[in-house]
Amino acid sequence: MAIIARSTPAAVADRRRPGPDIILFVAMVALSAVGVLMVYSASRTRLETLGLDPTGEMVDQAIFAAVGLVLFFVASFIDYREWRNVAPFVYIATLLALGAVFLFEPGAARAQRWIPIGSYQLQPAEFAKMAMILVLASVLVPAKEEGMSWRRLVQTIVIVALPAVLIYLEPDLGTMLVFAFITLVMLFIGGTTLRQLTVLMTAAGAGALAIWRLGLLRDYQIERLQSVFNPSAADPLGAAYNLIQSEIAIGSGGFFGKGLFLGTQTNLDFVPAQTTDFIFTAVGEQLGFVGGALVLLAYAIVIWRLLVIAGNARDRYGVLLVAGIAAMFAFHVYINIGMTVGIAPVTGLPLPFMSAGGSTYVTMAISLGIANSVWLRRSPVPGETYIV
Amino acid sequence: MKLSWRLTWMVLVFVVMFAVLFTRLWFVQIAAGETYDRQAGNQNVRIDPTLAPRGNIIDRDGIPLATSSLEPWIVVDRKQIPLEDEERVIQQLSGLLELAAVEVSAAFENAGSGSRFLLAAVDAGIEFYVLEHQDDLPGVGIEEVPVRRYPQSDVMAHVLGHIGRPSPGDLEENPKLDPNSTVGKSGVERSFDAFLQGTAGFLANQVNAVGKVLKPLGGEPARAGATLQLTTDIDTQKVLEDALAEGVRLANRVKVATGSYTNFAERSAGLVIDVTDGSILAMGSYPDFDPEVFVSGLTQREFDELLERKVFSNLAIQALYPPASTFKAITYTTALEERLFPEGAVSANDLIECSARLNAPFTDASQLVWRNWTWPNADGYQDLHTAFERSCNIYFWQIALRIWNDFKGTEREDVIQDWARAVGMGERTGIDLPYEAQGIVPDRDLFDLWAKEQPWRVRDEGWLGGDLMQTAVGQGAVLSTPLQLATAYATLVNGGTFWQPRVVQRVFDADGQLVEEYQPVAVRNVGITPAATQSLLADMRRVTTAGTAATAFSDMGADAFRVGGKTGTAQMGQECEGVGEARICKDRDNTAWFAGVAPIDSPRYVVVVVVEEGGSGGRVAAPVARHIMQYLLGLEPTDIVDPRVEGD
């Protein structure tokens, strides 16, 4: 427990108004900066070949980052406890937004995930992740700290299931998995017994098997999942193409990388979706193992700070909120980077603060802002928590 | 403290997740990084080979016979054709090139998926169309490709040979060979392929995922192949080829006029060799072909048709015929050098009767009706010289009989064959052209060998006296290529030096620097006494002035004394096809030979002409050879006709 701060007599004596989490903020800004640079490196050649402004995509991403940082501060200033009061409205709004995507024309791969606003495509599923954390935390706060009632457990599952079904219909497998992971982690922090968890996991496993067997997954989803376990056996130009190309790109980076703008694979369009889902390939190829490891370190710092905030939260609601945010964050990082290095399925989860795209960036920035709000409102006595 | 164990577990889970990511990143980038790096390089750098122009081939005076020029071809890069578009692209190319879609499709198939290959030569119109319609024709481009051209068309085709795409065997033998390149398939194109090939270059380009070239990364220019300078002379060659074609026509006119024939003549061959060094001045085979048909490609039907007519065989080195009476020059020299004359003669000047037929010298399995060609008439009393001039079989059979009776079963029974082999019969001459046939000089050992290995070729009794008699007049099992006969005559008339025949004398690199100069190779010296040589030359002159070829050479008047030669009329065995019950045999007409020497006083050239199933050597082959020798002597060649044929 070295990471999570505990109170010391000296600290108790230091009763100052707590400041914001500077480390968290710096890590976030650093990741954003690298992200903008990577988006530029991975998009400029393609844009140039198309006769467009090579900085176009980078500028968009920089604007998203600026908006995101502003929202980070806004979320920091809002007392996180306010969210508990509006949780039912947030939940209903989320369901409506998730339903609204079906009113619009399908996008890539016949998927309906977007609501067009001007020239931008709003992706409600991204915001839904944060919204569900707010809602779940509100639902789980009254639970017993050890040993949750079965009734509450089922209630929680039902609340998650509604938006999950909508997301399944979009379809967006990645977001469904994020929901599942967040729910699991928050239930655990919320006080489920090991027995309850076991039952839940068994039920989830059986459900997954049923979905698989009943053919409820799209063919491409199955292929993508399979290609993780055996990429060379799968069609190299089909489902496994993304995986093979991204592994080649990252692997060819070596220790120090090929140098910024010198990545042949990412700069020459071999890697698909290289500014969004596969942005990490640009890091791995151009900045090498050193760059990749530093990016991983930055994410580890973010998650470390989130865990520290959770451990120092003033109340149970704060703990649940930040634990949910940490789970969302860690899962995104693990699945996304894991996917680019071939140990996780291609599920289309963006890499927080780096993947090009406004909805994700804003969601992640707001969620860290909420975590920062929890930090700002922790007990003035370091280590002193109200729940323990 | 109740909460903290749950947070601790969360921390542990996250630590494990990050540890897994970190380890995997290490593995992909450091442990397996090199493999991935290689794969990356393979993907984003495209190396296109640039074909080297084949070296030129020039005649002895530098006149171009084969050249290379850069011409637009359609090049297809299957990697760049989306699979769903391929059928459409094939259809479009088929329409554009006016080729059947199945043929275009077959070309795609043969080249293999993901390959880049040359499809067809195109004119400026199609080139422009393709360049204008790049969007409709993905993966289809135009490239300037070195193309083989033969400015003399079909002249010297068999010596030059032809080219083609490498066969699977060629590619296996030389893995560096570009399947789009060309290799020699016959002639000097084949035997000197290594020189002519040149060195392919390459162009390296950086490409993006869809194969679009982003920037050139340099490369190496192709280096043209070396230039071959032949020993042949284009003008002599043209005279020879025209004469050979005319010889076939003359043979058929004679056949029609005399009415005695089974088949029409269809083929002929001939060559002119320099007896002082073995250089081939001209070599021809009729019918011939234009090697360029292989460059632009020909349909299977066209190819089969040419194959049916056997146009690709260089009969001068590949066809085997019994040399017949032309072989008498060898038996003649043997008789003089070994002092072996017919029974009752002790010198070359002793006369014996050239009777109408020889009375059964043997009663064994080699018994034949031994008729002279003058049968039923006898040809008077003759010595060796007259017998050569009049081509008296009786005299030469008697020489064989003498050898058989005196030396049967000893080493010396092969004395004629030994001389034949010494002057180059029965083994490949080693000319610098592919597919040379070997020929046969039979003897007891060969018959014994055949009895063991190819029993259908010989009777059970083995080598008999009649076989030696047949051999002495170039019949029986004796077989020779026109080239072998020419080298034999060259050796007989130059005093006994067997020069290896050759068609290539020098090789220059692409910059004109001499790379290789082939000196004439004297394989051996047979050692023929000057008296024997002079005697043979004098008697060869008698052949053209008074003997079997006198009529054919009558056009030359007094100039007929400047040349000499020997006629030959070969009896051809039946031509059989199939085996057992289905075996069908048909008779063949005699094959006409003439071997000539010019000038006869100091021999420089030997001319050999053969007209397959052409009939009489004196009537058909001799006029052809005369025409060529007139040219060689700087005389105006007279028409190849037979005064005995009406209208000729």
Image: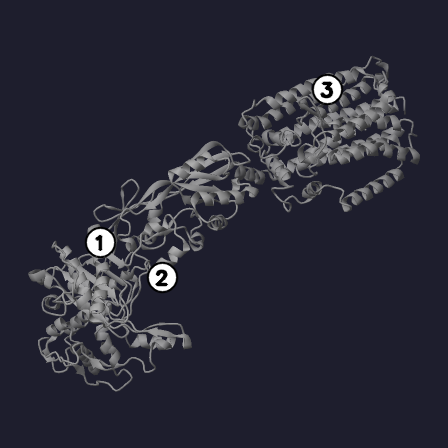
Q: Residue furthest top?
A: A16
Q: Amino acid at mark 1?
A: Gln
Front-lying residue, A162 or B85: B85
C-alpha distance separating marks 3 and 1? 92 Å
From the image, tell me which residue sits under label 2. B308
Residue B290 position, x and y percent, is 31, 52
> Which quadrant of the view contains residue A182?
top right
Question: Could one spot residue A299 in this view of the protein?
Answer: yes
C-alpha distance separating marks 3 and 2? 87 Å
> What quarter of the picture does the C terminus of chain B occupy?
bottom left
Q: Earlier in the sequence, mark 2 or mark 1?
A: 1
C-alpha distance separating marks 2 and 1? 25 Å
Residue A223 position, x and y percent, is 69, 43
Within 10 angstroms of label 2, few (less than 14), some, or many (20 or more) residues? few
From the image, tell me which residue sits under label 3. A25
Front-lying residue, B487 or B18: B487
